[in-house]
Amino acid sequence: MYTCRATNQTYIAEVMIEGNASLDVSAFLAGLQWLATDTATIMEATLIAQCEIIGDETTCWCENGYIWSDVVCDSVNTCCNTVKCVANISDYTPLCVPKVNVSLVGTIDTALLPADLETTLQTEFGAMNGFSSLNVTKRTSGDGLDFVVNLSAMFKTTKVEGILSTVQQSNAGILNINVTSRGLVSIDVPTWKVCYQSTRKLSCTIEEEMNSCMWQISRTDLGTQTVGAGTEVDILSLPTCTLDTAILLLNITSFWAGTYTCIFTGSAGTVSHAASADLMVALLPEEINVTSIPPNPDCSVAQQIQVNVTCSIYKSKEEYTVAINDTRLSPADPNSAIISYYRTFTINCLGTRLQSLIAYCNVTNSLGQNTTAPLDVPIIYPGDPVCEKDDPWPKTKNGSKATILCTEPGRVGKKERLCSSKVWQDPIDLCIKEALNTVAAAAGDFEKGVGATEDGASLIFDNLKNTTSVQNTYGDVKATVNVFSTMSRASSRVTMGETLLPNFIDSASNILNTTWDTDDKSKVKLATSYLTSVEELVKNIRLNTSEGHNASNVQLQVCRKSSVCNRTVFNVEVEVNSSASEVKTIGLQKIASLLPKGAFTDAIYPSLVVSATVNDSGPVNIRLAFPTSVDDKSYSTPHCVFWNITSERWSQEGCNYTQLSSNISFCDCDHLTSFSMLLSKTPVDLPFMDQITYIGLGISICSLVVFITIEALVWHAVVKTNLSHFRHTALINISLCLLLADCSFVAATFQNILTDTLCILLTVAQHFFYLAMFFWMLCLSIMLLHQLIFVFHPLRKKVFMILSMTIGYACPTLTVGATYMYYDKRTDVHYYSRSTCWLTYDSPMKGSIHAFLFPLGTIIFINMFSMVVVIVTLLKPAAAESNKKDDKEAAKSIIKVIIFLTPVFGGTWILGLFVFLMDDNKSIKPLIHYSFTIVNSLQGLFILLTGCFGEKRVRDEIVKLVISGRSAKSESKKNLTVSTAKK
């Protein structure tokens, strides 16, 4: 018997030779056309077996390096593991096969270890073809044993499954038995170093069809983990992998350097076949820590400063080349777990003034790839604003952020503190528990694809529940929300079952017991992330029999196979009409208070947010019955809202408030998301309010342009006295400020296309120009009051101009500047609202809007006092003469005063104060709201009518301009006619 090796496959041919001599038949075989194709080439012919036939007796044997095939062993059991076989087997194909090194690593778990178990193993495995040895190790705990079977021949999976079944049936104490072979699977992994952040395919093949497969990765710091679908790995062999399996690593970093194992498993689940290989990666450090001593070089105390810059990386098998600012360095201690490199810089404080020292650490690997980490070291010069040292916080340059490491036992991370306006802001504690940090790292690995199994997800949520069950800081809350967000993204790729549901719900509930101490912007972002990730996890977790789970702050209820689902969470009755086979309803306490009120600034919120999800698409309607616990009738306008994830605001779109009965508010919505119900002082969207505002502002802006143009044309004609100069100067500035304020208001309504910078600039512009308008009104009021009281001591023009410019522009500048700087330091309340591009209101006496309301109210009070003085002055002659004719004239004068002075004294804004301060009244307040909007949007028109057309001298000059314009035009036509006639 000979074997012929072709280019791609191995063929077996049988040659019968008479006599008892072996011959070289290679030349003979080469001339035979025994192959089905002419493309095959015989590379070599090797003698693998011989048979000797004497009479009716046949004796065969395999040559060195070969062993009886399974065909022979299964047919003639006596031939297995013997050198010569006395049987008529010469026509068996194949007769002998090459020897291979195969091992079976097995484990047996028992309740009570049988005494003859080792003997049974020896008997059963000893009968296998190519059996070499059996090594058995009994566990000291007495609950089983481990064994290794060494073979020199391949085998069928069903044969070993049969042996295991026999062993288990003959020993009643065996609880579990399984084996994994080595040597039957071929693995293809690069034997060279692969590039950092490259893509690489790893594959395995087996000759026998199997039932399932999996991949594992082993690292010293990670242990052995299952590789699943993730952001950095694709499983190419899913859903089936009978003969081969492959994974594609999408972003190879140090995380993916390790030993890979592919495992095929048979249908019985007791026999697996595995192969392993190491993947070597030209590493780059995942983290480079660049620091300086001192962190803020202080040139105010020295003429020259030495700055020591340190670049630290974790020790690695990779041979790195490290340089700081292009200077190649050697490690201070190459045997340390963290290897550091040092370089000293000298700062000449008397030389060129630098804002900061820029240092960068460059790390290069063995394949020439590199990565760089920069460091910006702020330099403090004499006179620079700083925050003085506040142990443990170092002296820090204004506008910079100081960072210190956590020192509390059992916590890792850092704390940050901002130096703003030479004042230390409140520290932000980003320290987290070590156990929580481990969970967060495991979640990150899970998302990448390591440990990405249902059991892995259950373990993560189990540990998360345990770590969040005790006191949590803001850092713990942020880390936990990040875990939720990470696992929610992974849940779209990895199946998550109902076993993890209780731990997930309890973890989500635990962090709602913690105060989220951070600025509003970060709080909104974190709360939105929490809400989104919790809803996504609830949607993706597959439930079989679970009816939900309730915790102190989170409740989940499930409906199945019902067109109408009725469930109650935190006393809110939820009715979902849907054709879906499964509906999940979740209630979240305390989350609504973490989200901004936005347009509903004067509303009160319940602590509850309710969400529902269905397992398929289709039309859906939901009704929520919120218990109304507010007895104050001033809060009587209910609104059904949902949290819009995209725009990060509450919205009423698709939701309607239907009725209020027995202290129950009903909300009907045609979509599923995060719902809540609020009670507001006023309806947020009054009918036609926007249209009235825009039309009125358009008229006002045009009127102000006309007014300013007319004033420019008639200025020299009407300004003849100091009094008229004072009045028209004030009117011009009032009109100009109102024009710019109205334009800023219109521009600020396009929040969707405005950047944060433009939004804050428009807020500042509105704040400044509206205040400037009121302060110029105050100037006009003071001037009029002075003229009435001090009749024989008139104001000089120079005094008025200095006084009016100071009051009109300096006062609003100081007010706006001080307000902005004050709220810039605050973390709980901001200067402006991103959703409205206007000042903020949080509660009475809290919010930047008060920096507008207080000056406005004060000025309006003074102006109204001035108006009263004018009216009283007009009434004195009428009171003295006391006749009906004079009374009638006095009444006309009073009406004229009110009409002419109200627009320029800001009297119409009194309605605005009523809107802001008064309690809700469904009939009166909307009426006042409409009145305020109409009269204030038309304020420019009123100024044009009263300040321009209401003054006789101005009207006369306008008439003169019109007449002179017509006369000039007529004269021009006359001259043109005469000239034509002469021709």
Image: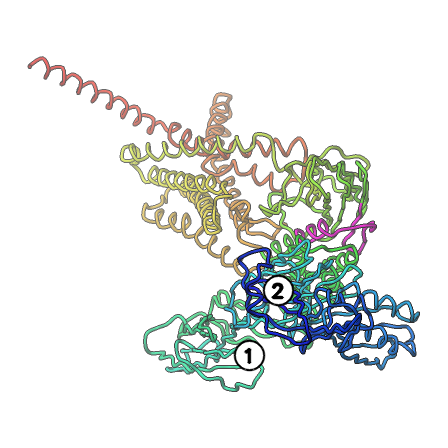
User: Which amino acid lies under the numbered mark 1 shown in the image of this protein?
Assistant: Lys
Residue at coordinates 73% horizontally, 65% vertically from top-left?
A: 92
Q: Which residue is mark 1?
A: 317
Residue 793, position as x, y percentages in the image: 37, 45
Residue 226, position as x, y percentages in the image: 69, 65
Is residue 561 shown left or right of residue 439? right
User: Which amino acid lies under the numbered mark 2 shown in the image of this protein?
Assistant: Thr
Res 541 seen here: yes
Judging from the image, what secondary structure is the residue with disc 2 in?
strand
Residue at coordinates 35% horizontally, 38% vertically from top-left?
A: 728
Q: Which residues are magenta?
A: 531-558
Lower position in the chain sequence, tag 1 or tag 2: 2
Residue 798, position as x, y percentages in the image: 32, 48
Residue at coordinates 92% horizontally, 70% vertically from top-left?
A: 170
Closer to the camera in the image, 174 or 902: 174
Closer to the camera in the image, 262 or 539: 262
Q: Which residue is mark 2?
A: 10
Res 443 seen here: no
Q: Look at the picture and state if 823 lies above or below 787.
A: below
Q: Quadrant of the C terminus?
A: top left
Is residue 147 shown left or right of residue 310? right
Is residue 100 shown left or right of residue 559? left
Closer to the camera in the image, 307 or 859: 307
Closer to the camera in the image, 756 or 299: 756
Is residue 537 on the magenta stretch?
yes
Q: Look at the picture and state if 695 lies above or below 162.
A: above
Q: Residues within 10 Å of mark 1 (few under 14, many from 20)?
A: few
